[in-house]
Image (cartoon, helix red, strand yellow):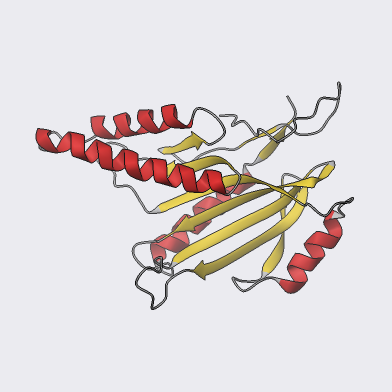
Amino acid sequence: MSPDLAFHGAVEAAGTDLPNGYSLVLPPAWVRIPLRRGTEQAVLELADRACKQLPGDFPRDKVTPYRMELLRRLRKGAKEAQSGSGLDLYLPGAGSGASIVAASFIVAEMRMNGGGEVDPVEVLARLVGEGDRTGPFEVAVVDGSVGVRREAIAGGGAAVEAELPSRRVDYIVPVPEDPDRWLAVSFSTLGGGDPSDELADVLVELFDAVVTTFRWSRT
C-alpha cells in the first residue's frame, strides 16, 4: 500500500529528492479512507464490505438501516479528519467473526506559518521543553526524521456534551529537506471502555509498531 501524501503546492522542480508521499504497513483488517480524493468511494466500499460480513442470521430488514448508520458514522469521521488537514484516515475493519474495536489514526499535513524560514531543531526543542496541557512530548525518530511523540488521556468531563475519554498518541515530524512542512500521525482509542485498560495498552503498542513501518516516498 502506498497512500498518496498530496502536499499542498506539490514540488515541481525536476530531479528533486523531496518526499512526495509515504507508505506504511497496516495490521490485518485495517482499512484506509483517503481524505483528499476518493473519500466517498472508499466509504461506500467499506460499508458494502461490512454488510457482506454480517452473520447469516442478521435480520434482512435491518441490513439497510445498519448500512445507512455505518455510512453516516464513516462520513462524519472522514469530514472531521478532513477539517484537520487530514490526508488519510485508518480504521479497523471487521473480518468474518471479528468485532470492530473503537480505534483509529489519522495522517495529516501541518504547516509552520511563521512567515520565514523554520528551524526544525528549534521547533522540536520548544515542543519537548514546553509540551502542552494534553501531555509532554518526547523525542522520536520516524524513518530518519527526528520528531516528537506524545501519549495522553484526553476528553471526558462533567459536561453532558463532553466526549468520552480516549487514549491518544501523536507523532509529529518535519518533512525531510522541507522544514516548513510537517506530518502528524495521530492515534485515538477508547480501549474496552477505559482508555487505561489492557486493550488500550495493546492497541497503543500496535500503533507504535505501525509507525515503525512508516517510510517516506520520493516517486
Q: Quadrant of residue 200?
A: bottom left
Q: Residue at x 27, y 43 (%)?
A: 69
Residue 14 to residue 75: above or below: above
Q: In the displayed image of the protein, which residue is found farthest to the front? A: 115
Which image quarter is the C terminus in?
top right
Q: In the displayed image of the protein, which residue is found farthest to the bottom? A: 158
User: How many numbered marks are there?
Assistant: 0
Q: Residue at x 44, y 37 (%)?
A: 31
Q: Is residue 209 left or right of residue 46?
A: right
Q: Quadrant of residue 114?
A: bottom right
Place of residue 34 in the rendered image (x, y in percent of width and height, measured from the top left): 52, 34
Q: Residue at x 55, y 68 (%)?
A: 152
In this rendering, does residue 153 appear at all?
yes
Q: Residue at x 55, y 37 (%)?
A: 25
Place of residue 103 in the rendered image (x, y in percent of width and height, measured from the top left): 43, 52
Place of residue 140 in the rendered image (x, y in percent of width and height, measured from the top left): 71, 57
Q: Is residue 7 left or right of residue 41?
A: right
Which image quarter is the N terminus in?
top right
Place of residue 134 in the rendered image (x, y in percent of width and height, measured from the top left): 59, 70
Q: Is residue 167 left or right of residue 9?
A: left
